[in-house]
Amino acid sequence: MKRLKLSTIARQRHFVSPQRSILPLITPNSNLTNRPFTTTNPITQSTTTTATDPTEPAPQAQSPIQPPTPTTATTTAKNANKTLHHTIATQTGLYSTLHYSPGSPFFLPHGTRIFNRLVEFLRAQYALYGYQEVLTPTIYNDELWEKSGHLENFRDDMFKVFSGKKSRGVEGEGEEAEGMYSLKPMNCPGHCLLYKVKGHTYADLPLRFAEFAPLHRDEIRSALTGLTRVRRFHQDDAHIFCRRDQISAEISSTLSMLETVYSVFGLSNYKFVLSTRPEKYMGTLSDWDKAEEALKGSLDATGRKWTVNEGDGAFYGPKIDVILVDYQGKEHQTATVQLDFQLPQKFELSYDGPGGEGEGIKETPVIIHRAIFGSLERFMALLIEKFEKRWPFWMSPRQVKVIPVTHQTPEIMEFAKKTRDVLAGVETGGKRQVMGKRTFFVDLESRNLGLNKAIREAKSAGYNVIVVVGHSEVGSGEVGWDVWEGGKYVKKEAEGLEEVYRKLVQMEAEYQ
């Protein structure tokens, strides 16, 4: 795989602001647990870190929120970019970065657990909001990118793919004979191809395709910062193919889904920004006016304040961006909702109107591009800074720790192992695990540290539930458990293992 050399213009547009935040170094061991996000900047000048738009062919510099006056700081910009989430993640064993693949994080088991929980959580919401998950290729012939307009507008940010095999045809023919290929920077062209696999009628719409595929975009190496700026990332990407009379309802439904999702993570202080028609645009003024009015109406219906970023819409349509501010005071675009009238025309998408198939009435759908998390890596970075090592139980990589009072008594060790398996939801004694049964991350303390030290280490590591097993537990078959609640460990009464497991299932179901 060969990386394209970025042009000077491409290099400039990657940076949203000419100034970077200069922040004091804050150690992860500070009292930063469960910090709230804010929409004001108490530390320094905020710099919007825009998640290169999930569907926009040409990223544009934007500054939707006026930053406060900067304060004096002492560390370098490079350190400031990675201070919190990168350092916390390193100390808690979530992910690593290696020079073999710059900008592509290597997720360790605990980080992968969090990542997968995010995906599982959103999949559950997809069932509620009527999305169908799909899978599309990672590599496409450049014929597709030329058709979609990405070669014209996004070429400098795409990775080219070269095959080591030569064509077996005419001597001297190579890659050029078979066509050039690129890694996909976004999913929308692939979803348009899926739409065209079969015909659709007006009754089939809206059609909602969702995908968590990895995407690749060629960021400047010096701009790579932990999980907030990466080259390989995942989006909770979705494209809604709908009729024009369905636009307002679909936008409102998407914003309602966003509010529901963000409330689970305690993210209430986000801002909406409406980006309107740019100087260079495609389509008619009438289309643009209708699209902007639809977005405005949906924003008003949320009851939240929103601002306008004049002229910063994509060339194919206006969009709503969601802005969060991290603990360092830097702004990040996470979610986005975009209206697209142009891609359906480029791909000649259509559906049969009310007259029915064969009546010659063909209509062109509209595409709503939307992402709730945006980049899962970036969203995860914000959560790392918010929760540090005290994750909510339902998404914690360290949910339960079982600690035997001694490793010298076989009966205690045997019951401790049984406790681990039951609370983990593991079907012991069989060859297959039942699909659909909830499982949890339960660790058994295998080191002979001594009881007090083992408990201290488990609490320091951030386990949500700690279970101590001794002679009395073996005799009664019941265990007491300490649960992290309200900033401290709370002791629960002893119960049978199956009952404790059911309590864990309830905690997860309620997103505790």
Image: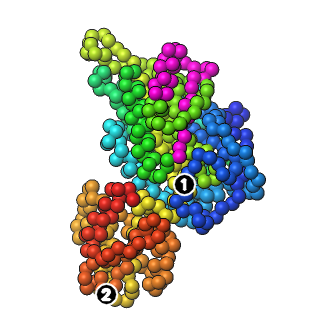
Q: Tag 1: residue type? A: Pro
Specify the label residue 36 is tagged with: 1
Instruction: Write the start and end of the magenta stretch as one range.
Output: 269-297
Q: Residue at x 31, y 61 (%)?
A: 505
Q: Does residue 387 belong to the magenta stretch?
A: no
Which is nearer the eye, 141 or 380? 380
Image quadrant in which you'd find residue 405: bottom left
Can residue 395 be spotted in the picture?
yes
Q: Position of residue 31 (x, y in %)?
A: 59, 65
Q: Residues within 10 Å of mark 2 (few under 14, many from 20)?
A: some
User: Is 357 left or right of 284, judged from the image as shown?
Assistant: left
Q: Residue furthest top?
A: 360
Q: Residue furthest front?
A: 303
Q: Residue at x 42, y 46 (%)?
A: 261
Q: Residues within 10 Å of mark 1 (few under 14, many from 20)?
A: some
Can residue 58 be spotted in the picture?
no
Q: Residue at x 66, y 51 (%)?
A: 42
Q: Position of residue 454 (x, y in %)?
A: 46, 80
Q: Position of residue 117 (x, y in %)?
A: 41, 54
Specify the label residue 471 is tagged with: 2
Q: Tag 2: residue type? A: His
